[in-house]
Image: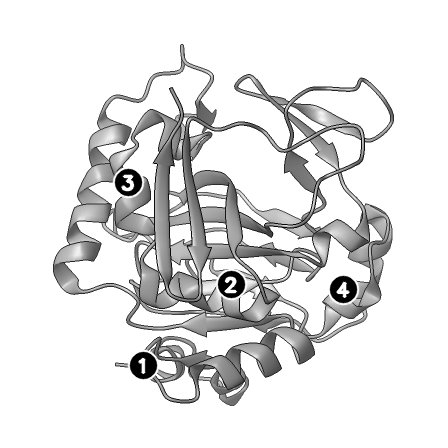
Amino acid sequence: MTACDFAAVVYGCVMSLAVPTLSPKSPRAEEIVRSSLDDLGFVVVEDAYAPDELKSLRNGILDLESRATTDEKSFVYQGDHLWAIWNLYELTPSLMRLAIVPDAFRLAAIYLGEPVHFCRATMMKKAPGGTATVDWHQDTSAAVERDLGDADSSGIRDGVPHRRVSSDVLDRMLVARINVEPQYADGGCLQVIPGSHKWGKIPFEEVKQRAAQSQPMLCPVPEGSILFYRPLLAHASGPNTRTDPNHQRRVIHNEFRAASIKPTAAVDWFPWKHGAVCASDGVTFSVTR
């Protein structure tokens, strides 16, 4: 079942059929990626994982969740529910090799026109029956090597400094949301404003105001798909209102940047121990000791 077919079944709305999708092995994959990311700001790569690959990825996350505790800053809770896991691949390095598959992630390098480097990974989860939502926003912060303590500093997450970066930097970055489970319209799937990356970097309140005057698009997509988007694309998500306990909503939020850019002249990217570089001909993993 393709992402479009899945959207039609789950959401039952013609608008969902406009979600741009492709197979990583499609002869038109590069063309669709370029046009969709340029014009709409997002694209879905379906069937990115073989069934056994997806099973291993999910099992790795479940194993990590089984060790989660409120005493560790890597695990973020909302009430009794695990909401996020910071620095995912540092906690479980094997997940990086399962998640960043060459057929799909080479498209990021092809789109940006040069190799792309891993910047950050977070697992985000919405339990069924929850009320948690994420308001309309752009992704404007990046993980950096040190906190400068200035107006662009955006906090330290589990020991990793973050800061807001310029539009020029954000335009050379891509986000890849790996959909570990099916993303349902009533299960907290991603919502986007197509083309909103062309607004440029704007204040948070203005993003919300513009989104309120725009037509959002729900992105219910099947498990094993990857939704690539430009960081300045306005996006949000509603609550997971499903009641079946098996209908979790887990995604792995990955950030990548073009090899040639720095966050600012004064500070470099965060030096992760476990890294990955995606190129047009595959993916290379590294470990810094």
| Residue pictured at 35% horizontal, 75% vertical | 24
Within 10 Å of disc 1 (Cα), the crowding (few <14, some 14-19, many 20+) is some
Please identify the residue farthest to the left as the structure is shown: 52
Q: Give the residue type at disc 4.
A: Ala
Q: Secondary structure at mark 4?
A: helix
Provide residue 110's location: percent of width, then percent of height. 52, 70
Q: Give the residue type at disc 3.
A: Leu
Query: Where does label 2 land, which residue?
Result: 109
Query: Where does label 4 land, which residue?
Result: 211
Distance between the alpha carbons at the discs numbered 4 and 2: 30 Å
Distance between the alpha carbons at the discs numbered 3 and 2: 21 Å
Q: Is residue 99 left or right of residue 165?
A: left
Q: Is residue 184 left or right of residue 196?
A: left
Quadrant in the picture for residue 45: bottom left
Which label sits on residue 158?
Answer: none
Within 10 Å of disc 3 (Cα), the crowding (few <14, some 14-19, many 20+) is some
Q: Earlier in the sequence, mark 4 or mark 3?
A: 3
Query: Where does label 1 land, which residue?
Result: 2
Q: Secondary structure at mark 1?
A: loop
Q: Earlier in the sequence, mark 1 or mark 2?
A: 1
Provide residue 67's location: percent of width, then percent of height. 25, 21
| Residue pictured at 26% horizontal, 48% vertical | 98
Q: Give the residue type at disc 1.
A: Thr
Please identify the residue farthest to the top as the structure is shown: 71
Looking at the image, is 262 positioned above or below residue 181? above
Query: Where does label 3 land, which residue?
Result: 95
Distance between the alpha carbons at the discs numbered 1 and 4: 28 Å
Distance between the alpha carbons at the discs numbered 3 and 1: 25 Å
Disc number lying in front (1 or 2) = 2
Provide residue 250's location: percent of width, then percent of height. 36, 48
